[in-house]
Image (tube, helix red, strand yellow):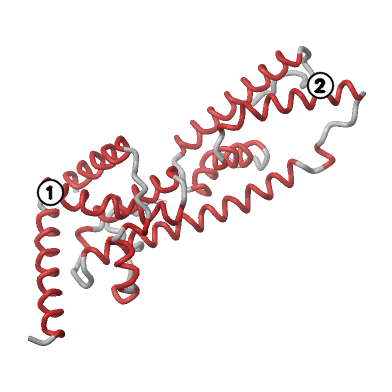
Amino acid sequence: MTAKQGDVSTAPEPDDISPAELREFLEGGGLDEAARPEFKEALRTRLWELLQNQ
Amino acid sequence: MSRDRIEQLAAERIARRDAQIVERLREADEAAFDALYQQYFQRVYAFSFARLRNHADTDDAVQETFLSVFRSIEAFRGESSLLAWIYGIARNTVNNQLRRTCSQERRLKSARSFLMRSDLLMPPGTPEDELHLQRCGSQIRRRLSSIADWQTEIFVLRHLENLSVREISKRMSRSSDSVRSSLYRVKRLMLEAIDSGTARCGAPVLGERPSW
């Protein structure tokens, strides 16, 4: 499922997130699993095009 | 200075910094875009992988998270920090992905039960025929081991449940092109597997090639 432009249905309520969750997120969830570099670069290209065309 | 006052100043500083980043993103500033992407990509990836435990689903979730972030950046009002906002989108996206995976697994289990129904199995033949069938079956299973579960499900939905490509695309949350290319890949692998199975077993025990 992909969100439509301007769709914030996947965004949380601000009070719905605990500091512990955020800390875990900042620390990478305890896993150092790396993405494929080509995936990271392809996604960067797609996102940059999206941002430029908005 | 009191602890509350220090926390308040820190929060104000973060809010100002977030507002500047968002303003620059709205102006399509590439440096700001890169800074945000580099700062959050690995965090979103590691967070998603920790829950989904495979790279294919993680790639989908990370892509969806960042698409939502950049498509919705105009709607960011600073009511939470940018960090909390991105985390929330990542968390909801991963939860949706997990729900989708569970539902697919349930449907796959039901499809497997259907395929194992005794009335769909071939009637018993001579012991030689059955040995032949077993050998061919294992050849075919080996060739088909590279097919992902979701590709199997697409095949089952199309050829056993007779759904259209559009219906499958909607149900599986995948594009029609992705469904068609998956069907093509599975069919090609199955035909190769059948050819290989019959060639190695030395007899056309499976009859004619299917007409998918």
Q: Chain of mark 1?
A: B
Residue visible at 63% across and 47% down in the picture: B108
User: Which residue is more in the foreground, B119 or B145?
Assistant: B145
Picture coordinates of residue B151, whole percent (x, y): 55, 38
Q: Please tell me how crowded label 1 is: few (under 14), some (14-19), or many (20+) other residues with Cα within 10 Å.
A: some
Q: Chain of mark 2?
A: B
| Quarter the N terminus of chain B occupies | bottom left
Q: Is residue B150 above or below residue B92?
A: above
**Quadrant of residue A34 within the rendered picture:** top left
User: Which residue is more in the foreground, A16 or B23?
Assistant: A16
| Residue, disc 2 | B132
Q: How many marks?
A: 2
| Quarter the C terminus of chain B occupies | top right
Q: Is residue A39 above or below residue A2?
A: above
Q: Residue furthest left?
A: B1
Question: In this image, B108 relative to B150: left or right?
Answer: right
Q: Residue furthest bottom?
A: B2
Residue visible at 76% across and 12% down in the picture: B202
Q: Is residue B79 above or below residue B137?
A: below
Q: Please tell me how crowded label 2 is: few (under 14), some (14-19), or many (20+) other residues with Cα within 10 Å.
A: some
Helix, strand or loop at mark 2: helix
| Residue, disc 1 | B28
Residue visible at 53% across and 52% down in the picture: B101
Q: Kindly indicate whether the residues beneath marks 1 and 2 are on one polypeptide chain.
A: yes
Give whichever of discs 1 and 2 has the lower sequence position: 1
Tag 2: amino acid:
His
Tag 1: amino acid:
Ala
Residue visible at 28% across and 61% down in the picture: A26
Q: CA distance from mark 1 to mark 2?
A: 64 Å
